[in-house]
Image (cartoon, grey):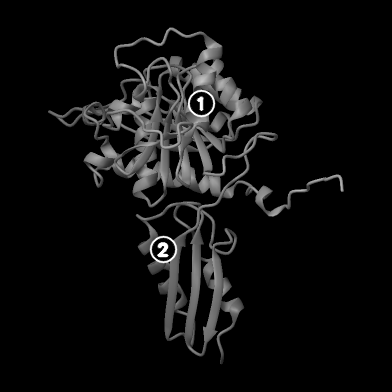
């Protein structure tokens, strides 16, 4: 009896993508199925960077398809295919940036910049081309966290070349000023600086640009929502009630301006004593999960209050770089895959397929 396409699809419907929680048919990942006698060839196109899980997914697919009667060999090509997704209505996409992820918090001191840096590095570690835009004009911290020094160069006198560190492209006002110079600017100057940093940097074909926002819901956040094509926002909070109050305001702001919420990252969720091993929830317990449930968004992950995370970020080699296989890095990579998978489910940008109409007088 010959193997049918429907048999293969039914088998793939039984398999759940470990990141998206969809089967490979429902998620439209299974492509180009070819049957030749007892041999099957197919592709599994993942919409997110997946270096850590590609081999396990390939094994999952091969093992299941080999159980079909008559199958002698399965060649499964599993790969990532990251595409541009739509942003706020009326905001034009940047041709050199496929997707923009805003990392925000309602208040300072919750570890937002550390989370943003490790998220960007985790996306890169999973195989994506990633950039980091430090939008905290008053307190730029990404140059220190990414261990990048020097000034950006300009080849054409009009645009700046992105700086590079740990395999990602980066831009920050911190590269342009003396570290001890305070930015005594009013709102309009700050928002103009943000637009210049974004639009006058020569980003090189980014799959994702991570924007590290300042805390709060002020001028920069409003400019971002109105003029920058944000694919989605990640809200960083601690379990503490005061932090959650402000985080909720940040989440509601993005909802009002039409920016999708990718999910919530709960930082400093628990602390394990390095001497006795006792684990304690210093800032409360379950706050991020309750907030995610209240607003019907995903809790992307919970990170510990760990001295090493802080020390590594301060040294210019964040956790994902310093301990790529450590427990915290695995959490960051899981968060990165979930972020990218959520984005992959959003509607794709179709503007490039429509012809431009030009009216000329002849």
Q: Is residue 252 left or right of residue 148?
A: right
- Find numbered disc 1 in the image and state the secondary structure of the residue it sits on: helix
- Looking at the image, can residue 304 be seen? yes
Q: Nearer the viewer, mark 1 or mark 2?
A: 1
In the rendered image of this protein, does residue 168 appear above or below residue 149? Answer: below
Farthest front residue?
Answer: 362
Q: Tell me where residue 184 sits by quadrant.
A: top left
Instruction: Please state the horizontal and vertical placement of residue 117, each as a whole percent of the image.
Output: 36, 33
Task: Quarter of the image for the N terminus: give it.
Answer: bottom right
Residue pointed to by mark 1:
196
Instruction: Please state the horizontal and vertical placement of residue 242, each as a whole percent of the image.
Output: 45, 14
In the rendered image of this protein, does residue 352 appear above or below residue 45? Answer: above
Q: Tell which of 161 and 115 is nearer to you.
A: 161
Q: Tell which of 234 and 245 is nearer to you.
A: 234
In the rendered image of this protein, does residue 43 appear above or below residue 321? Answer: below
- Looking at the image, can residue 270 be seen? no
Q: Count of labels shown? A: 2
Residue pointed to by mark 2:
57
- Find numbered disc 2 in the image and state the secondary structure of the residue it sits on: helix
Residue visible at 40% across and 19% down in the picture: 240
Instruction: Please state the horizontal and vertical placement of residue 40, each as a whole percent of the image.
Output: 49, 81
Residue visible at 50% across and 69% down in the picture: 43
């Amino acid at each position: 009896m010959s193997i049918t396409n429907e048999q293969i699809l039914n088998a793939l419907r039984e398999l759940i993508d470990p990141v998206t929680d969809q089967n490979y048919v429902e998620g439209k990942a299974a492509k180009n199925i070819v049957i030749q006698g007892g041999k099957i060839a197919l592709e599994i196109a993942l919409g997110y960077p997946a270096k850590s899980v590609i081999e396990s997914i390939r094994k999952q697919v091969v093992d299941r398809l080999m159980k079909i009667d008559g199958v002698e060999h399965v060649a499964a090509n599993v790969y990532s295919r990251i595409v541009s997704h739509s942003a706020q209505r009326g905001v034009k996409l940047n041709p050199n940036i496929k997707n923009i992820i805003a990392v925000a918090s309602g208040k300072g001191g919750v570890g937002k910049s550390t989370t943003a840096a490790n998220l960007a590095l985790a996306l890169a570690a999973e195989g994506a081309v990633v950039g980091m835009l430090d939008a905290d004009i008053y307190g730029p911290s990404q140059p220190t966290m990414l261990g990048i020094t020097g000034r950006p160069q300009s080849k054409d006198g009009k645009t700046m070349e992105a700086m590079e560190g740990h395999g990602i492209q980066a831009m920050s006002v911190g590269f342009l000023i003396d570290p001890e110079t305070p930015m005594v600017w009013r709102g309009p100057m700050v928002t103009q600086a943000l637009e210049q940093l974004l639009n006058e940097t020569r980003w090189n074909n980014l799959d994702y640009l991570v924007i590290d926002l300042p805390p709060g819901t002020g001028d920069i956040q409003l400019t971002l929502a109105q003029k920058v094509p944000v694919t989605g926002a990640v809200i960083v909070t601690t379990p503490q009630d005061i932090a959650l109050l402000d985080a909720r305001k940040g989440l509601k702001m993005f909802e009002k301006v039409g920016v999708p919420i990718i999910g919530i990252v709960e930082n400093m969720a628990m602390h394990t004593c390095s001497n006795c091993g006792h684990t304690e929830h210093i800032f409360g317990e379950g706050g991020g999960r309750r907030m995610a449930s209240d607003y019907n968004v995903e809790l992307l992950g919970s990170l510990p209050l760990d001295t090493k995370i802080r020390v590594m970020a301060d040294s210019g080699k964040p956790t994902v770089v310093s301990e790529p296989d450590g427990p915290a890095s695995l959490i960051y990579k899981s968060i990165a895959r979930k972020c990218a998978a959520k984005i992959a489910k959003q509607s794709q940008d179709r503007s490039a397929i429509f012809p431009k109409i030009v009216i000329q007088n002849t």
